[in-house]
Image: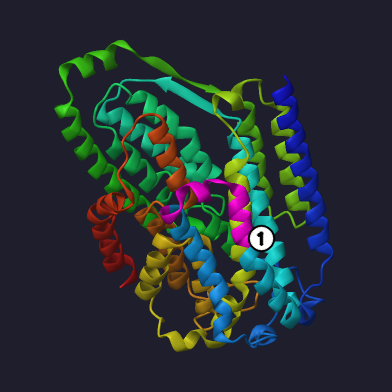
Amino acid sequence: MRRDFQRTGSFFALLCAGIFLLSLCQTGPARAENNSGPSHFSGAPLGNPGPKPATQSDHAVPEWDPPVWTVSGFALMLLSIALVPLAKPRFWESNRNKLIVTLALALPFGTLILLNDRHSLFYEMREYFSFIVLLGSLFIISGGIYLHGNIHASPKNNVILIGIGTILASLIGTTGAAMLLIRPLISTNSERKYVKHTIIFSIFLIANIGGSLTPLGDPPLFMGYLRGVPFLWTLRLWKIWLPTSALILVIYYLLDRYYWAKESIEAKRWDEKYQLPIRLNGKINLLWLIAIILIIFFGLKSPYREMAMLSLCLISWITTPGGVREAHKFTFAPIIEVAVLFFGIFVTMVPALLLLRSHGSEMGITRPWQFFWASGILSSFLDNTPTYLVYLSLAESLNLPPEVILQSGSGVSHLVLEAISCGAVFMGANTYIGNGPNFMVKVIAEENSVRMPSFFGYMIWSGLILIPIFVLITWIFFS
């Protein structure tokens, strides 16, 4: 009881701090050149382009043209996230140490930005808070849903589970879907010897590619929504999402049949004998997830959008039956880690975004296939959210056909935006560090005695399976 009380108290403290920070962000200075215009932070409701944006001339020349060396903070932040866990894994386990690294980079570079272009810094901080509130809401609410059971571990059932997770990823986010499905997948296959390929393919589909169809699915797409991409625009990606997901599932089915044939007779008998039906606890949280979807879908404005999401977190915390989160092994540690690291990313990436808006046309990346692979390669080794924003800013600087009008007033073409979106979301599956859920799934699998491949071993799997598919996607859709 004491532990539950302490955890509940921590949640209330986090909730109150979030509301307080939101109020501070909303009262901060807006962009001087757009004081009378629409909010940059409201997103675009439904399938409409949203409120009338500022004209492109208002934003053609940033308030500050930073020197190139100021991008070093952003580069160091991303390299820290990519390399420190490999070089110093024990050091990186502590969120306190992540905070130290983040502040060591964010404070000096944030001060520099504040002195030269405070409007851009406040702009990114507001988007950061909207971003974290959405991720936190999906994380907390989906953490109150516990799916468990042990069904027959046949290739057919495994395909069904991964397929369901692939669809759910666009509705409750890749993190929520991965955390919901990983334990039933492991439990179902617990009697089998060959399991790691199932976990690898769940990372491919549930933790990455599945989250392509809504801004709720993957953080890069939500950032696009905050910058003016209409909510329903991401549904355009279905024509790429569907054949990609189907092809990967077919490959998985054939591979799982091969490994199923290699299983011993004894393992198959144990699998037949020890089965439990799939059960879902914490069903009330499905209602709160639907409420989150409706809040975004109907374009509720900031700060009311964030306050409504935080309120739903509180309702979820109160209404979730006792023991569900404990069975799910729920902790705040993962979302705190994301909040800490992304604070550093959002602060230090300001100079990079400003430089891209001013000089992006000089990079030579102009064609859809170039955007697909450039955003994809960076998303494989860095985080896919800042990668998406970097290439979206680059696309804004190219005077492309204004088929999608963003909140900045700039326009981008449908095909280029599709290429950036698919590159960032799909190729986050190429490595363990390409997207947040990837490493979380790996850790949970290893905790349950599944021997997962090393960092480079995983890349062999993704290189042999995903890269040829991405080449095919390029030829069909982006060439």
Q: Nearer the viewer, residue 407 or 458?
A: 458
* Residue 210 place in picture, x, y as percent: 43, 48
Q: Nearer the viewer, residue 145 or 71?
A: 71
User: Image point 74% across, 37% down: which residue?
Assistant: 10
* 182 in relation to 137, above or below: above
Quadrant that contains the N terminus: top right
Quadrant that contains the C terminus: bottom left
User: Image point 70% across, 64% down: which residue?
Assistant: 125
The residue labelled by disc 1 is 128
Q: Which residues are magenta?
A: 86-102
* 282 in relation to 110, above or below: above
Please give left or right for residue 428 compared with residue 111 in the image.
Answer: left
* Residue 466 place in picture, x, y as percent: 28, 55
Query: Residue 373's image quarter?
Result: bottom left
Amino acid type shown at disc 1: Tyr
* Residue 205 place in picture, x, y as percent: 38, 46
Q: Is residue 96 magenta?
A: yes
* Residue 53 place in picture, x, y as percent: 69, 75
| Chief secondary structure of the magenta portion | helix
